[in-house]
Amino acid sequence: MPSYTVPYTALSAEASLEKKELMQAVESVLDSGRYVLGPEVKAFEQEFAEHCQSKFAIGVASGTCALHLVLRGLGLKEGDEVITAPNSFIASAATVALAGARPVFVDICEDGNLDPERLEDAINHRTRGIVPVHLTGRPAKMKEIMQIADRHDLFVLEDAAQSLGATLDGNHVGNWGDAACFSLHPLKNLHAFGDGGMVTSQNPDLVAHLVKSRNHGLADREQCDFWGFNCRLDEIQAAMLRVQLRRLDAWTHTRRTLAHRYNDLLRPFVNVPDEGPGEHCVFQTYVIKAERRDELKIFLNENGVEALVHYATPIHLQPAAADLGYTAADFPVTMDHVGKIISLPLYPMLTHAQQDRVAELISFFYQNN
Amino acid sequence: MHSTMQVKYSYLDEQFADVETYFQDLRELVSTGEFTLGPFVEAFEKKFAAYIGIKHAIGTNTGTGALILCLKAVGVKPGSEVITVANTFIASAGAIVAAGARPVFVDCDERYQIDVSKIEAALSPKTAAIMPVHWAGCSPDMDRVLEIADRHAIPVVEDSCPAVGASINGQSAGTFGRVNAFSMHPLKPLNVWGDGGIVVTNDDQAAEFLRLYQNHGLVDRDHVEFWGVNERLQPVQAVVASRVLDTIEDLIEARIRNARRLDAGLKGLENYITSPYRPEGYREVYQLYLAIATRRDELLSFLVSRGIEAKVHYPIPIHLQNAARDLGYQRGSFPVCERQADEIITLPAHQHITDEQIDFIISEIRKFYGKH
């Protein structure tokens, strides 16, 4: 593995800043003897709900589990269809398949999120819901999506895995639809030291269902009301997450400042992720669109910048989706994106000097090649 | 004569009273930033596979997840039936439903294990797997289960969730079936600081499938072979499990010693409370120390009032749960299991209990039955 002067993440360096607090949090769980669904999970759920200005928040084992449990909780059946974006992480569609339904894709807008104008063409009598994805920390066009969902009586599950803290017209992502799912995977802005996920919802019936379905369908130690799963957020992860949640606003602020700085530095050379009207993005990934992307990526990597692509193959062209019958010609905007997107390192500990180095290399690439 | 003594059911705070060695490992993990699969999980998997004597071990997020993965790996699908017992934790049946199949229960025997003589009557053309449970950390008669399964060409999946370290004539639980599951929930013999599980198999193809399936079907970062799930063992838990595994034999031996002392203490009370027949060659790990007691509910209240944290696993058999109402069973379907649900009691017998505490449990039981 090459050693990067601008690595894609700084997880261990970030963790080392608060190692003492993290270890204390773990130790307090150990001393309590409560390792599963104890007070730390409960407290984290409350703090997370407050942070998102949501009524309820439920801790689960991963972002994938969050999507799966909600889709099950909404009562999907074999033959149902759920619409989502083809340029997301695989789990957005895989959980629809896992819940027994068929994922249906709709092309995206220039901003990388689901295009509301194309939504209605994909809706038919089998359509049960829409899973808009707030990709890279940018809110999807929720006003338009909610209008369409209401018109067709569809549920909306926001895949907010990458966008904790993002707002649209001042309203948090996650509070527009019936429920929202968040990931606490290590590469997320707020992350566990392993896997973790959250569901937020304003619907008490759905929440009551999730509280049971994440824990075997158990109403109490002895009574099982329906067949469930084991998808619990770990108590020690919750304890460590609480330490980090206290710093999230400050981190997000830094992240946004750095993203805006990147935008100014890179605008002459590439398409930068400016925020649209009413959007407050959290830049979980900083994605630019670049001509000659593959060459640029190699150039950056060879010069010490760990640039990545999220994601190089859209979901509808994965072998897993072969049975769904899509082709490369189906979603032209997605395909244009897939050929141009590149994710640059962005995290609160990224220095201006590192950012300048990235900008210098990109400038050099386009001026000298 | 003891007036009173606390005998706690959980021992986690005692087991992990000295966390320094674990924290050394965790600091190392944190300094690498390897929080998703990676070397710490792999190292644990190899160590566990060597411990039970099998080719592949694959860490999972939970024991339930491990069971679902096993069932998927042997080809259970929607419309399938899977045979198991009704006297187990709800997750055994929940995993079958999660895999899209229908749980078909058979009754248990006086050892609380699957009644092997009832398996064949439960087979149907839809039976896709037989899933015996090593209930309470004790093994069913695996030779006979395998003999029936082989005769009908049906795969066996061992729910060995409670039974790390259990064995029959030296062969470990989890090495009899085709693909088998363990749990590392905090109250299991091999435990972690939250949830964790392991799938084990000697079948290379099954292992290859499961490694993809447990991680979204990802062949590499960009390619998804089939729809998968997120069912990964957390590296933090792998680090803990690896340490606990270093001392697992000592933990199990302590449990066995404590169980024998309880067995001996209950001698002479056979008309009131009995521990099960323990056949030669079966190594039990006493994940639960179970006994059958007359006036069980009164005994339970009495012991709890005396500071002894006894429990019941479980008062409602799975086939009588609300969740199972569509499966068509009723009271009377499994008479042995139902009788045990009314009479069974779990006594604290873990590795941290002292001889003095065990003797106190015995003397209180004797007192309750008027035999002191």
Image (cartoon, coloured by chain):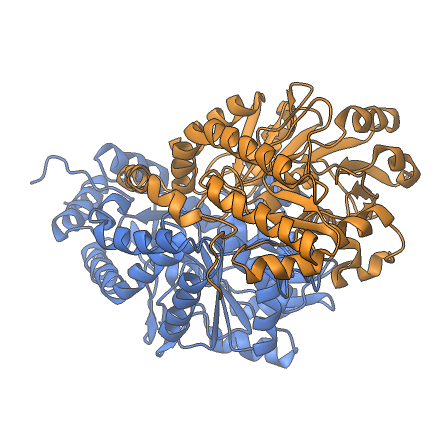
Residue at image position (64%, 66%) is B219
**Depicted B315 relative to depicted A327: above or below:** above
Question: In the rendering, at what x and y percent does residue A347 appear?
Answer: 50, 41
Residue at image position (81%, 50%) is A336
- In screen coordinates, is B356 left or right of B258? left
User: Which residue sits furthest left?
Assistant: B1
Which chain did the image draw in orange?
Answer: A
The quadrant in which residue A197 appears is top right
Using the image as rendered, state which of residue A220 and residue A130 is in the foreground.
A130
Using the image as rendered, state which of residue B33 and residue A223 is in the foreground.
B33
Question: In the rendering, at what x and y percent does residue A73 appear?
Answer: 67, 37
The quadrant in which residue B123 appears is bottom right
**Depicted A98 relative to depicted A14: above or below:** below
Question: What colour has chain B?
Answer: blue
**Depicted A144 relative to depicted B353: above or below:** above
User: What is the quadrant of the N terminus of chain B in the image?
Assistant: top left
Question: In the rendering, at what x and y percent does residue A303 appear?
Answer: 54, 59
**Depicted B230 relative to depicted A15: above or below:** below
Q: Quick check: can you spot residue A222?
A: yes
The quadrant in which residue A295 appears is bottom right
Question: In the rendering, at what x and y percent does residue B301 appear?
Answer: 31, 34
